[in-house]
Amino acid sequence: MRLLDEIRGMGRPLVVLTGGDPLERDDTVRIVEYGTSIGLRVALTPSGTPRMTEQVLIELRDAGLARLAVSLDGSSPAIHHAFRGVQGSYDWTLHMLDVARSLGLSTQINTTISRHNLDDLEAMITVLGGLGIALWSVFFIVPTGRARRSDLTTPEEHEAVFHRLYDLSRTAPFDIKTTAAPHYRRVVLQRQAAERRSGTRVGAPSPLTRGLGFSLADGIGRAKSVTDGSGFVFVSHRGEIYPSGFLPISAGNVRTHRLADVYRDSDMFRALRDPDRLLGKCGVCEYRAVCGGSRARAYALSGDYLAPDPSCAYVPARIRNDPT
């Protein structure tokens, strides 16, 4: 509760209780209730298990839960289970969504794109269309934890998925955002700029993503990138303060440090928020202020969180014009 008070002192950010499974704790509903009572927006990402009953969902709704986000990583049980490693989680997840929707809870699906389900994308989109979700959050795998380098898709495959997501965003009954793939924002800007040139778009290009329930723009309306350590901070179950769950370098611990002090003033977090500190092609890219690449993936593959994101296929104009 003290940590939630500290977070509220930083403004009114979205707080996501994740895991593992947050329902392993017996006070999760109380945490949601307290966070809501002090003015925070609290979301939950439970695992697909029988632990999430209708009664628990009712208690979470009544406690003020802002959104329920669940993982679905395939259009079929076989594809989902091959990735999650838990038989039965596919049906439990869909049941959880059905009950949550019947109770009036806002829901979203998190899907991790990797080698295991790249060919399942179209079938997955078909399934999502009937689930009544507010947001599809598409994660692009980072080789950390159980994930392996062999699970990664190529930069060209990333790019193809981005374009498919943009096309889908124009007709889907849900909003779309990406995680660990800020270069989707660059694709959105490029596509919208092309639409303006062709006369099919009136509004100015904007990389902002809808569906989050809060603005990603700064106080004067400029686009703000939200990625590892920039608009985002992760606190582990041991209290370690990381730039994200995929970039496990601790800058402090909430038992001994104020979260705001670490986020605002630590050398690592300040470096992550400075696009001019980026190296290689990310450092000279004209989109670095709205993208910046995945710092987690750069670290996982190179050991340097300021290195260029190896999953990006784009060649910046400065390099194209002066390849030397």
Image (cartoon, grey):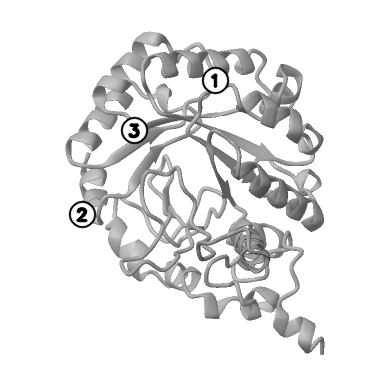
User: Residue 96 appears at what percent x and percent y?
Assistant: 49, 16
Mark 3 in CB contact with mark 1 (< 8 angstroms) = no
User: Residue 104 appears at what percent x and percent y?
Assistant: 36, 20
User: Residue 33 appears at what percent x and percent y?
Assistant: 23, 29
Q: Is residue 259 above or below residue 31?
A: below
Crowd around label 1: few <14 · some 14–19 · many ≥20 (10 Å): many
- Given residues 296 and 100, the one toward you in this image is 100
Q: Residue at x 28, y 30 (%)?
A: 32
- Given residues 29 and 175, the one toward you in this image is 175
Amino acid identity at mark 1: Gly
Q: Is residue 239 above or below residue 29?
A: below
- Given residues 123 and 149, the one toward you in this image is 123
Q: Tell whether 124 sits left or right of 52.
A: right
Pointer 3: what residue?
Answer: 66
Distance between the Cα atoms at labels 3 and 1?
Answer: 19 Å
> Can see residue 58?
yes
Q: Residue at x 20, y 46 (%)?
A: 5
User: Residue 303 appears at what percent x and percent y?
Assistant: 66, 64
Give the number of marks. Answer: 3
Crowd around label 3: few <14 · some 14–19 · many ≥20 (10 Å): many
Amino acid identity at mark 2: Gly
Which marked residue is nearer to the observer: mark 3 or mark 2? 3
Amino acid identity at mark 3: Ala
Distance between the Cα atoms at labels 3 and 2?
Answer: 19 Å
> Can see residue 141?
no
Quadrant (top left/top right/bottom left/bottom right) for the N terminus: top left
Q: Is residue 319 above or below residue 15?
A: below
Q: Residue at x 53, y 75 (%)?
A: 275
Pointer 2: what residue?
Answer: 9
Pointer 1: what residue?
Answer: 48
